[in-house]
Amino acid sequence: MALLAGIVWLCLTSIAMAHASLTSAEPADGAVVQVAPQRFSLSFSEPVSPLALKLVRPDGQTLALDTFVLRDRTLEIEPPEGLSPGTYVLSWRVVSEDGHPVAGSAVFSIGAPSGAAPAVTEADDWPVRVALWIGRVGLYAGLFFGIGGVFASFWLLRGSDRGGACFAVVIVVGLAGTILSAGLQGLDALGVPLSGLFDSIAWRAGLGTSFGRTVIVMTAALLLAALATLPRLKPWGHWLACVALLAGAGALALSGHASAAAPQWLTRPSVFLHAATIAIWIGALLPLAKAVRDGGTGAEEALRRFSLFIPYAVAVLVVAGLVLAVIQVEHPAALVETAYGNVLLVKAGLLLVLFALVAVNRWLLTKPALAGETTAVRRLLRAIVVETVLVLAIFAVAATWRFTPPPRALAIAAAQPASFHIHTDKAMADVTISPGRTGPVTVSAIVMTTDFGALDAKNVSFVFSNPAAGVEPIRRKAFKPGDGTWQVDGLVLPLPGTWTVRLDVLISDYELARLQGEIAIRP
């Protein structure tokens, strides 16, 4: 439990990393441009939807940027008129395709820097993050103990009334956690503190993300499970419970990391199967414990059916979980190097303990308990209680994934190129560095005339330097691969930060154009 608390605290207090990452900005972060930009541009590693865009002027005044166009993964923003010289901060807050908010800023200057950049802070809101985690745990409890329990009581315990009051409590907890999660999601998306929970804009923002679909479908599933427990609807209880389980498991596949992972024809069904088998297994624990404690032929039959079901449930659960883990983690090293991988390791460790306990129950305690041995029954009941505690711990760990981007998303962001445009009175160039981070990179450039026509240069050389880090000019002669670009392969950029890039373009035997600009290289 101490380890569990440490992992939860680590994930809740860690810096929020992007689930969709900024791959390029125009103007680039740290750039100095001579004239006011005609447009702002933000490109991301995944499709996003804007939530809040603003520009902080050199005097600290904040301007809302309301005119923009979203083109696939690029957000093109119309800047305000009359931007004077000085340092500006382009601040953005968007929601990624998996429903998680992403925020950041890019600092640029017009003419020359005007001293320190205006301050823009994006601190984590602890109360909102803790409330989000609690809400997610409540949602899991409602699905797995509530909906799963109702389903198990009809299909494994054959309509027994065991656990009715417990189902009601857990379903209410699930409804509260699910519904509140919508508002909390909106607070997190907008960067609003917990006091804004009663503002309708937070609820609209939360329901407007992909997680909003999960909230709506999960709420309907919980209500169907509650209806299935009503005595008047008992003849329809089997089918209501079945639809509730299908809807609840499907709700988890509508948002989150897996919803944005490719191939979705594999990830979404895997999430569904993973959730459905967990719900049936975990939901049966409490009513089964009560049935075993009360005894009788009905308990024996329920225990027998449950013991036959468990091996198949565990097999489906493990296969679906492995599929999702392989897709999200990609490389074994990410299990140790990323917060997402750390959470997965803790969850896997708890699952191994749980599976070992299940094996003991299945192969050592079930048969004696069915034979009526009092000691075996007591041990089985204690084991079920321990299983329940382990499941709650797994829920608590899994809920922290809300705050940890998967290695898959981090790898996509790390592989994104960095690019910028250089414009002089003799020539222009669009330069791309792929990937836009430290290490071996490929540099390519399209060289053009000042009217965007093709420029048939005799040769081109790239010169990289980082004076602030003490890196003297690194010169590489480019070649033409045949696609109209000039390219350099295998160049190593050893340090992150702002690099100066110069293109020496030999236009003719007597004319040389030097094009120079700056680009930010990620770690």
Image (cartoon, helix red, strand yellow):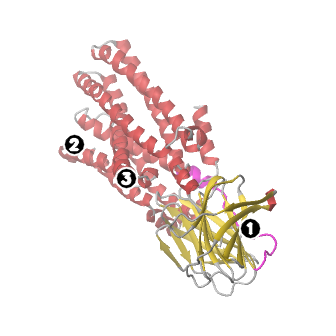
Q: Within 10 angstroms of label 1, few (less than 14), some, or many (20 or more) residues?
A: few
The kind of secondary structure the magenta stretch mainly shows is loop
Q: How many marks?
A: 3
Identify which residue is drawn at 44% across, 48% down. 139
Dot 3 falls on a residue whose secondary structure is: helix
**Taking 239 as reference, is 332 above or below it?**
above
Q: Identity of the amino acid at label 1?
A: Ala
* Residue 100 percent coordinates (x, y): 51, 57
The residue mark sitting in front, 3 or 1, is 3
Q: Is disc 3 in contact with disc 2, using a CB cutoff of under 8 Å?
A: no
Q: From where the camera sits, is residue 87 visible?
A: yes
Q: Which quarter shows the N terminus?
A: top right
> Magenta includes 127?
yes
Quadrant of the image occupied by residue 431: bottom right
State which tag comes first along the sequence, 3 or 1: 1
State which tag comes first along the sequence, 2 or 1: 1
Residue range corresponding to the magenta coloring: 111-132
* Residue 344 percent coordinates (x, y): 51, 38
Q: Nearer the viewer, residue 413 or 126?
A: 413
Q: Identity of the amino acid at label 3?
A: Gln
The residue that mark 3 highlights is: 264
Quadrant of the image occupied by residue 229: top left
Dot 2 falls on a residue whose secondary structure is: helix
The residue sitting at the left extreme is 235
C-alpha distance separating marks 3 and 1 = 40 Å
The residue that mark 1 highlights is: 119
The residue that mark 2 highlights is: 238
**Taking 234 as reference, is 186 above or below it?**
below
Identify which residue is drawn at 28% across, 36% down. 153
